[in-house]
Amino acid sequence: MRENLTLTKLKDGRGTVGCWLTIGSPIVAALTARCGFDWLIIDTEHGAVSYDAMLVCVHEILATETTPIVRVAWNDPTLIKRTLDAGAMGILVPMVMNADEAKRAVDAAKFPPKGIRSVGGFVAQLLLGDDYTVAANEQILVAVQIEHIEAVKRAKEICAVEGVDVVFIGPNDLAASMGLIGTPFRKNAKWQAAVQAVLEAAKETGKAAGLQCADLGEGKERLKQGFRFVAVSSDARLLYQSLCHVAKALKASNGKD
C-alpha cells in the first residue's frame, strides 16, 4: 500500500503543515496539493463539499505526495467507512468529548481485529495498492478534534486511546464552549491555558497535537511550541484575501506608477 508520508513524519516526531479545503472544487484541490503542504483536509462538516466532490478531490490530491485527509461531518461509522473507501488516507473527527468517543472513531477506521470497519470498496484498493485491506490499519491516519472545554478536561484520556494519531484543537468551538464567542479569544488567558493543556497531554502520551491557526505568524509560533499538525487558513479564505488585496492595490494605483 502507498505510504502515508504525513503519518510517517508524525511517528518520527516531525512537524507537518496543511490547509483546509472548503470550496469543494477538484481543481482547487489539485492546485493546492501542488503547493508543498504535507496534508490537506477536505472539510465535509462545514465546507461546501458533496460526497462526489470529496471523492474527486481525494483522487486529485493522490496524484501528488500530499496526504488527503477528510473531516467527516460527525463521529459516524458509516461516514468514516465511505470516506476511507473513497481513498482518503486519513480522517478528522469533530467534537470528540471523551475516550469512548475517540475509540469509536478509531474502531470505525480500522479493519478487524483492530476495529469494525467493513471490508469492501474497490476504489481505495485500486488507488492505494492491492494489499490495502491488510496494510490500511497501519497507514490510515486517525485525528480527533478536541473543541470543547469539557473535552480539554479529558484530554489525557482521549490522547491515551490506542489508534489516535492526532488530537486537533478546534479553536472557534473551544472558544464558544468557554463563553468567548465574538471576542478576541486567542488573547484570552483561559483559552490559551486550555490549548496548552491539550498540547501537554499530547506530548505526555506521544501523540501529535494540531491546531487551526489564524495566520502564518501563529502557525510558525505553534510549530516552535511543539504542535506537529498545524493548519493555516483555508482555500476560500486565502482566495478571498488575495483577491481583495489585488483589487484594492489596483484601485489605489488608479493609473499611477
Image: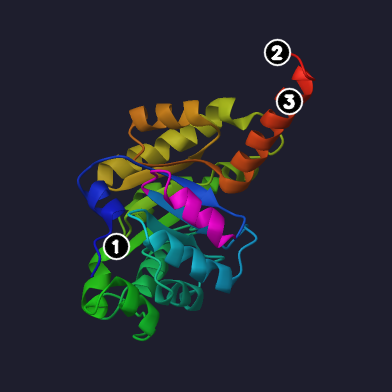
Q: Which residue is mark 2?
A: 257
For mark 3, give the secondary structure. Answer: helix
For the residue marked with disc 1, what is the amino acid? Gly
Viewer-side residue, 218 vs 102? 218
Residue receiving disc 3: 250
- Please give the name of the residue rendered at 41% of the width and 37% of the height, measured from the top-left corner: 197
* Residue hosting label 1: 163
Quadrant position of the C terminus in the picture = top right
User: Which type of secondary structure does the marked residue at label 1 adopt?
Assistant: loop
Q: CA distance from mark 2 to mark 1?
A: 58 Å
Q: Can the viewer see residue 215?
A: yes
Q: Residue at x 45, y 62 (%)?
A: 60
Which of 98 and 31 lies nearest the eye of the viewer? 31
Q: Which mark is residue 180?
A: none
- Quarter of the N terminus within the rendering: bottom left
Segment tinted magenta in the rendering: 25-38
Say above or below: 134 vs 162: below
Please tell me which of labels 2 and 1 falls first in the chain. Answer: 1
Please determine whether, in this image, residue 202 is positioned above or below residue 215: below
Label 3 or label 2, whichever lies nearer to me, is 2
Query: Residue 219 falls in which quadrant of the image?
Result: top left
**Magenta stretch contains residue 33:** yes
Three-letter code, disc 3: Leu
- Amino acid marked by disc 2: Asp
